Image (cartoon, grey):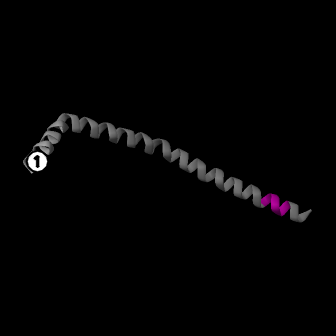
Amino acid sequence: MAIFNLITFFIHAVVEAMASMLRAVFTHLLPASFVAALLVAVVAVVCTSCGVGGVALLRRRKRNRG
C-alpha cells in the first residue's frame, strides 16, 4: 500500500507542476499576443503613412534600368 501512496504522490506532483507551468504560460501569453498585435498594427500604420507603394515603384525602376 505504501508504494501505491508513493506513486500517487508523484503523479499528483507532476500534474501540479504541469498545471503551474500552463498557468504561467497562459497568463503571459495573452498580454504578449496583445502586444504583438499592437506592434503589427503600428507597423502597418507607419508603412501606409510613409508610402510603401513608393518603395515598390523604386524597385521596379531599378529592375528596368539593370
* Residue 25 pos. (x, y %): 54, 49
- Residue pictured at 76% horizontal, 57% vertical: 11
In the image, 27: left or right of 64? Answer: right
* Residue 13 pos. (x, y %): 72, 58
Kind of element beneath mark 1:
helix
Residue on which disc 1 sits:
62
Q: Is residue 50 above or below residue 23?
A: above
- Residue pictured at 60% horizontal, 49% vertical: 22
Q: Amino acid at mark 1?
A: Lys
Point out the stretch of residues depicted in magenta.
Answer: 5-9
**The stretch drawn in magenta includes residue 16:** no
Tell how many labels. Answer: 1
* Residue 2 pos. (x, y %): 89, 64
- Residue pictured at 10% horizontal, 45% vertical: 64
Between 59 and 34, which is closer to the camera in this rendering?
Answer: 59
In the image, 38: left or right of 52? Answer: right
Query: Can you name the residue that lies furthest to the left here?
Result: 65
* Residue 53 pos. (x, y %): 18, 36
**The stretch drawn in magenta includes residue 8:** yes
Quadrant position of residue 57? top left
Quadrant position of residue 26? top right
Neighbour tally class for label 1: few under 14, some 14-19, many 20 plus, Cα within 10 Å:
few
Q: Quadrant of the N terminus?
A: bottom right
